[in-house]
């Protein structure tokens, strides 16, 4: 394993993961060219609701990838099939539950964020359509996680690019040609996610090296294996709760500063998502390689992957920060043409310059831990980072307002990197205590 082979895996994954924030980014960009900033604010609030719902179950992709990579590394066909089957049923059940509970979810979410009346109306319109895609979104997490764990990177890349290209084309068609407004962008996203699910299932059937027969129920609900999966998922669920607490507090406080500030923050948060998912490509590469190392007992591969992960955390953060510094105005104008929103985004945009430098280690090392399916350290590090954020939020925002809000977010990003790095020696000891082969 060297830089070239690591990048050969990471680059397609970077392209693949960069397509993930495009669903929200495209929606924001399309409505950002409508004349009223309430459209951006409403879609931003809607995206926060869906991020809250879906990110809580983001472990369906992450843990599926980790368990699948370990089964693939051990060449265990039965565990490879079970790594798909178990989370698939969970995703379907949760997605259907979201549809059945859509009324209470919408009411509670809007009550907590309490946006202005025009923003609330837009958010409600957006939510009422996109909610029907909940099962497809969660099932796509499982499909993509399984394909990545099986190292079917080109296939997962195709699915995500196809989904996002369809979303872009349909959003522009529905808004610019049919003049459907916000319901148009929500409908485009719904159709794209459903289509991606169908394509993903076809690819799993075509490219899998396994004979797909439904395993006996006794194997699916095996207490030891299911218990480990649920433990990992529980810890990742708690980690996501902490992350969502930060984003919800951030968005709710930003909304209290007015529609224009909410819209400017929404644009910057979308840029932040693109940066974060760039790092997530490296994290996925590290997760796959560490999963294979654990499954096959290859200590040398693990050590090399950890070293490459740290090196590319530094190099990629410098690259992203430099790119944003040079082209920030162009990035912002991709999302909106409203002068007041552009001016505010430029005013607060310098904080985004600090995000890659502060968050890269936290995101990329996250892949190392998920590949080893050792999620307790991820959970603990995020709890500590949340505590730091809360202190910064309630200390800085009253004095520095939206600048204080962004500074608190950067403090949180530093915390998630520093606290997770602290747990690396513990992970090394736990893995090295096993009889790995050099």
Image (spheres, rainbow, N blue to C red):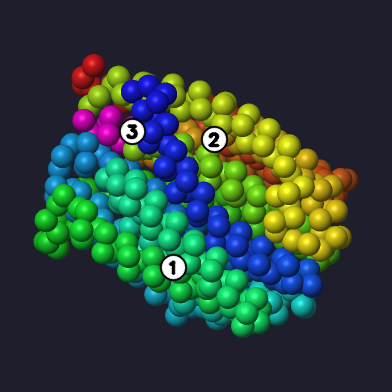
In screen coordinates, is 383 left or right of 264? left
* Secondary element at tag 3: helix
Q: Residue furthest top?
A: 438
Q: Which residue is mark 2?
A: 362
* Residue 358 seen anywhere in this rendered image of the structure: no
Say which of marks 3 and 2 sits in front: 3
Residue 289: which disc?
3
Q: Nearer the viewer, residue 175 or 6?
A: 175
> Who's the residue at 14% across and 52% down the image?
210
Contact between labelled residues 1 and 2, with CB atoms less than 8 Å apart: no
Residue 38 lies, in percent from the top left, at: 76, 71
Q: Which residues are magenta?
A: 290-296
On the question of residue 386 being in view, the answer is yes
Using the numbered discs, state the Cα–Cα distance from disc 3 to disc 1 in whole angstroms.
Answer: 28 Å
User: How packed is label 3: few (under 14 Cα within 10 Å), some, or many (20 or more)?
Assistant: many
Residue 331 place in picture, x, y as percent:
70, 50
The residue beneath circle 1 is 193
Front residue of 427/172: it is 172
Q: Which quadrant is home to the C terminus?
A: top left
Mark 3 vs mark 1: in front: 1
Residue for point 88% across, 46% down: 399
As measured in the structure, the alpha-carbon distance from the residue carrying label 3 to the one carrying label 2 is 18 Å
Instruction: Estimate the x, y position of residue 382 in percent, counting from the top left.
Output: 55, 41
Distance between the alpha carbons at the discs numbered 2 and 1: 29 Å
Crowding at dot 1, Cα within 10 Å, few <14 / some 14-19 / many 20+, comes out as many
- For image coordinates 14% across by 63% down, the residue present is 214
Circles 3, 2 touching at the beta carbon (< 8 Å): no
Quarter residue 433 falls in: top left
């Amino acid at each position: 394993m060297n830089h070239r082979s690591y990048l050969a895996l990471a680059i397609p994954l970077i392209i693949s993961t960069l397509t993930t924030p495009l669903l929200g980014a495209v929606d924001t960009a399309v409505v950002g060219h409508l004349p009223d900033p309430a459209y951006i604010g409403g879609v931003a609030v809607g995206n926060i609701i869906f991020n809250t719902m879906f990110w809580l179950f983001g472990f369906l992709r992450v843990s599926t990838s980790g368990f699948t990579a370990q089964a693939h590394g051990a060449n265990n066909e039965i565990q490879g099939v079970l790594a798909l089957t178990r989370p698939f049923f969970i995703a379907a059940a949760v997605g259907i539950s979201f549809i059945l509970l859509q009324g209470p979810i919408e009411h509670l979410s809007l009550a907590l964020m309490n946006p202005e009346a025009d923003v609330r109306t837009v958010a409600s319109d957006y939510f009422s359509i996109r909610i029907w895609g909940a099962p497809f979104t969660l099932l796509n997490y499982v499909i993509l996680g399984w394909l990545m764990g099986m190292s079917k990177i080109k296939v997962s890349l195709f699915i995500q690019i196809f989904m996002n290209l369809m979303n872009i084309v349909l959003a522009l068609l529905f808004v610019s040609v049919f003049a459907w407004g916000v319901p148009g962008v929500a409908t485009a996203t719904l159709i794209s996610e459903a289509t991606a699910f169908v394509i993903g299932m076809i690819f799993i059937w075509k490219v899998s090296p396994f004979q797909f027969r439904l395993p006996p129920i006794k194997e699916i609900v095996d207490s030891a294996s299911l218990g480990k999966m649920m433990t990992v998922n529980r810890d990742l669920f708690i980690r996501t709760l902490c992350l969502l607490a930060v984003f919800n507090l951030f968005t709710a406080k930003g909304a209290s500063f007015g529609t224009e500030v909410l819209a400017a923050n929404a644009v910057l948060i979308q840029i932040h998502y693109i940066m974060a998912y760039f790092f997530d490509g490296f994290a996925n590469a590290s997760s796959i390689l560490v999963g294979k190392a654990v499954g096959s007992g290859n200590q040398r591969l693990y050590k090399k992957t950890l070293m490459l992960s740290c090196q590319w955390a530094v190099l990629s953060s410098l690259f992203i920060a430099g790119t944003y510094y040079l082209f920030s105005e162009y990035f912002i104008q991709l999302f909106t043409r409203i002068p007041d929103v552009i001016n505010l985004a430029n005013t607060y945009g310098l904080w985004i310059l600090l995000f890659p430098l502060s968050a890269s280690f936290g995101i990329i090392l996250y892949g190392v831990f998920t590949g080893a399916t050792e999620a307790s350290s991820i959970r603990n590090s995020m709890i500590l980072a949340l505590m730091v954020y809360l202190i910064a939020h309630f200390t800085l925002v009253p004095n520095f307002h939206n600048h204080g809000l962004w500074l608190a977010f950067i403090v949180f990003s530093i915390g998630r990197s520093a606290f997770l790095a602290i747990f690396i020696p513990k992970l090394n000891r736990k893995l090295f205590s096993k009889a790995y082969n050099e």
